[in-house]
Amino acid sequence: SSQEISQLTRYVNGVEITSATILDTTYAGLQFQMPMKFDFGANIRHEFKKNGAISISTSYRIQDWTGLSNEVIQVSNQQFYKSSHMGIGLEYQPNTNGVSDKILSLGIYRIGASKQDLYFGINEEQLQMRSISCGFQLPFPASKTSSSICVSAEWGQVGQVGSTISENFASFQVGFVMRPFEKWFLRRKYD
């Protein structure tokens, strides 16, 4: 049987690291099954008597890739491991009733941290990723909708603990929450 593999790689401190492996399983005789993934999460929210709310969220995910052998994906310096992801986040909403003249009091503010053991490693050492993130969500000003804009940033490091193979990264995202069945444009009639 034959197989087709595509890999995306990048260099970190002069060492080539595979960032994604794509396996084409359309050829006869090749069998591949994605490993089962387990996700657990919890959220606690407290609303204050006068106004405002705070939420604490946590999540845990695990997926065992050790059953995937290099017979299926033939890479010379890459091994597969049990991956895990732990995350915790804090969300603060200063105004829960949605009525205020100040746009910043209508926002939602978030901060979080995560630690992940990746499913692959190099030279018999599993790669890890650690990151922190923060962001906010604000309603569109002067609109009659509950649609909003979201802005967030993330800083982190990918690599092997105690090794020279590591990479620092930063990302910045802008997103929109659009409510599809709201009236965005109103035509007012005056008598």
Image (tube, rainbow, N blue to C red):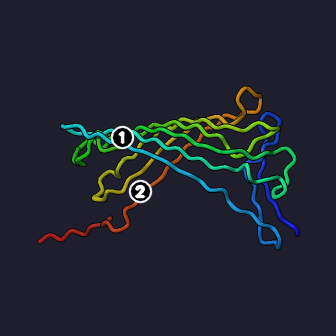
- Name the side, left or right, on which 60 lies relative to 159: left
- Position of residue 164 relative to residue 103, above or below, is above
Q: Amino acid at mark 2?
A: Val
How crowded is the residue under tag 2: few (<14 C-alpha within 10 Å), some, or many (20+)?
some
Residue sitting at the far front:
67
The residue at which mark 2 appears reads as 177
* Disc on res. 55: 1
- Asked if the residue under mark 2 is in contact with the one under mark 1, i.e. CB atoms within 8 Å, the reply is no
Where is the N terminus found, in terms of image quarters?
A: bottom right
Residue at x 65% of width, y 34% of height: 157
Q: Amino acid at mark 1?
A: Ser
Residue sitting at the far top:
162
| Image spot of residue 42 (x, y percent) | 42, 45
Residue at x 82% of width, y 73% of height: 28
- Position of residue 188 relative to residue 74, above or below, is below
Indicate the secondary structure of the residue bearing disc 1.
strand
Pair 1/2: label in front: 1
